[in-house]
Amino acid sequence: MQMNKVLIIIAMTACFSMIFLNESGAIGVAFPQMQQALNLSNNAVQWVMNGFLLTAAVLLLLGGKLADHYGRRKIFMMGLILFAIASAICGAAENSEMMITGRVLQAIGASLIYPSGNALLSMSIPEKEFNKVFGTVIGFAYFFVAFGPFIGGLFTDFLNWRWLFWVNIILSVICFVFTVTAIPQDKVMDKPPRFDIKGLIIFIIGLGALVFALMQGSIFGWSSVWTIGLFIIAVLGLCLFVIIELKTTEPLLQVRLFRNKAFMAGNIIFPCIPACFTALVFWAIWLQQTFNFSPVRAGVAMIPATVISIFMLRISGAWGGKIGPRTPMLLGASLLVIGMYWIAVSANAQSYILLFWGFLLFGFATPLIIPNVIGTIMSAVEPSQKGVAAGVWLTLQHVAFSVGFAVLSAVISTYDDDHLTRFLKTSTNYIGITLHQVHVLLAGGNSISQLELAPADIEVLKENAVAIYTHAFSYGMAAIGIFAVIAWIFTFIFIPRQRKM
């Protein structure tokens, strides 16, 4: 039995580490080289990330329902197989279509793995040991979030960016073998499952339309019929989703819980943190394009924003447990606001020394908020509702990842494309040069030959493109900083000074 427990812990640690690595800045560090190799447009690069985030956001709750009915082990292993196949597709991708398809399939696999894996761990570990074991598993897996950019840099610099996906196949096989060995097949439900299919479809349409409008707005035009139509569909779809969830007996998302003010506030504050975390992807790209950092050096440069969390999470949770969640959360939200806007302003100076302090503030801010806001959410509901409550914040976390990334993409792409197009049109030397060529040039590719431009003109073009992208990056950080401001406001107004016992 003891050996089975060890195998289960190893399997779940490897599994969650694998998923966290694919959601973190590890992929972002590899984007410039990936863009060169596959000749990706900036928009395609952004969809490589958000194709995963959006799909996971809309399917996560369904994955939990499927696991409850058809058996956690069966769904978990199906998810592992799909994730491994999808990773192989990503690793072998030769174009944007193949890469984005692989990432979407990865997310479908992850939406089956994550809820069923949590349930398997809960079923396999005695209740008195669960908190300790779960903390160990998630704590180790979080190492891959904290060091994700650095790990991504190591793979990209010393192996190949494709190994970021191929390594998933090895980890999936380890998880699969250990799961089959250590965990027996669990019982399935006798009665047919009752899925909120109507709610799921409307949720996919509403959230999908919102993210698609934000991601493609700079291409369609923000005043175009397509963009406006998508925003209308998004608003109507998400409003209709809330109405459906209030009326159905077995909702996909327990909207009624939001009547509790503490629960409502916690589930507004918490998603703001992953929304801000999406900035890591753009930090990784900007550091390489502006400072000519190698992928591994960019990963090292981002360590102050991530690694502090490993040490701070436990301290922050203990502090909040003693004095209540408000003080650490308010301090964290304040540091997050200052940090995001420090980065936004100091980016224009193109000085890493200045950026370092913004990264450091970010690194201290997020662990002050995360354990205390989750504690606030979970303590706001009855014991019988804690599983449902966890499903709510977990879903909103992935929705926030997707929406936050879409907002950043929209602001940065709109500013960059507009000003770069204006520069190319008003400079006679660059007539005929396309946005795509400039984007690939910034990623380090040889997109412009000396027959098209003299080397000196290429350098001038690159300098101007970097300056324009830096301004776009600055505006993007300011835009995503709004989520930090929202977190501060709701913490100040709604979080009580002392947690109710």
Image (tube, rainbow, N blue to C red):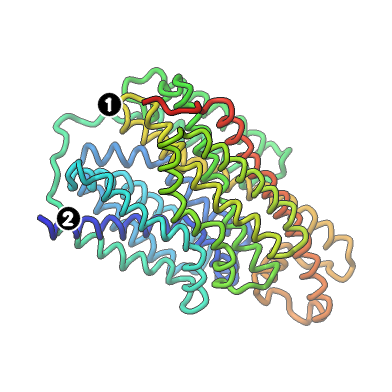
In the image, taking residue 216 as reference, residue 193 lies left or right, namely left
Q: Amino acid at mark 2?
A: Lys
Quarter of the C terminus within the rendering: top left
Q: Quadrant of residue 126?
A: top left
Residue 394, relative to residue 477: is it above or below?
above
Q: Position of residue 266 (x, y in %)?
A: 48, 32
The residue under the point 19% across, 41% down is 127
Per the model, the C-alpha gap separating discs 1 and 2 is 27 Å
Q: Position of residue 56 (x, y in %)?
A: 42, 46
Mark toward the start of the polypeptide (1 vs 2): 2
The residue under the point 42% across, 60% down is 144
Res 71 visible: no
Res 313 visible: yes
The residue under the point 30% across, 57% down is 13
Q: Quadrant of residue 440?
A: bottom right
Quarter of the N terminus within the rendering: bottom left
Q: Which residue is mark 1?
A: 384
In the image, taking residue 298 as reference, residue 385 lies left or right, namely left
Q: Which residue is mark 2?
A: 5
Q: Position of residue 170 (x, y in %)?
A: 31, 68
